[in-house]
Image: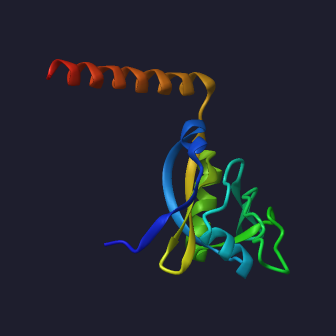
Amino acid sequence: MSDRGPDVATNRAARHAYEIVETFEAGIALTGTEVKSLRDGKARLQDSYAAIEEGELQLRGAYIPPYPPARDNHDPERPRKLLMHRWEIERLIGRMQRKGLTLIPTRIYFKGRRAKVELALARGRQQRDKRRQIRDRDVARDIEREIKHRNR
């Protein structure tokens, strides 16, 4: 049984814009007001990405709003350090360079008391691939609907 709580934020557009190759879990280094704001279920991952800078993994573009009751708040769009083992980061660097993949956050959630980010190694989709995916999904939905209707 997993002690993972509900998702705080999800990046739904990521699955449409990218082909997900593999997912990873990373911890996030946060301040106290950021944790409280996340516990309120407020965060946005749209247009965010993970970058490797000087051997460290950084989350960029994620928006965690200020916590209203706090006196000293955080910068809502500051870069946040992601926590992974050194060998995992080196493995990610190798894959990103060799295969031309991107690292994008797909969701933020709490696992026990700790905030976690699910990162996806992803390949960008071209417009025609996006249209094909939508068409295939619509066809599958129509087939399911027809089967359900015939079985009545």
Percent across and percent down for residue 41 are 60, 64
Which residue occupies the foreground of this view, 56 or 119?
Answer: 119
Residue at the image point whose x is 76% and y is 56% from the top: 61
Color encoding of the figure? rainbow
The outermost residue toward the front is 69
Percent across and percent down for residue 22 are 48, 53
In the rendered image, which quarter contains the C terminus?
top left
Percent across and percent down for residue 54 are 78, 70
Residue at the image point whose x is 74% and y is 69% from the top: 80
Which residue occupies the foreground of this view, 79 or 39?
Answer: 39
Residue 31 in view, yes or no = no
Q: Answer with left or right where residue 114 lies relative to residue 77.
A: left
Residue at the image point whose x is 82% and y is 73% from the top: 74
Q: In this view, does 18 lie above or below 146?
A: below
Residue 36 in view, yes or no = yes
Percent across and percent down for residue 118 are 54, 61
Q: In this view, does 14 lie above or below 111?
A: above
**Quadrant in which residue 62 is drawn:** bottom right
Which residue occupies the foreground of this view, 88 or 97?
Answer: 88
Residue at the image point whose x is 61% and y is 67% from the top: 90
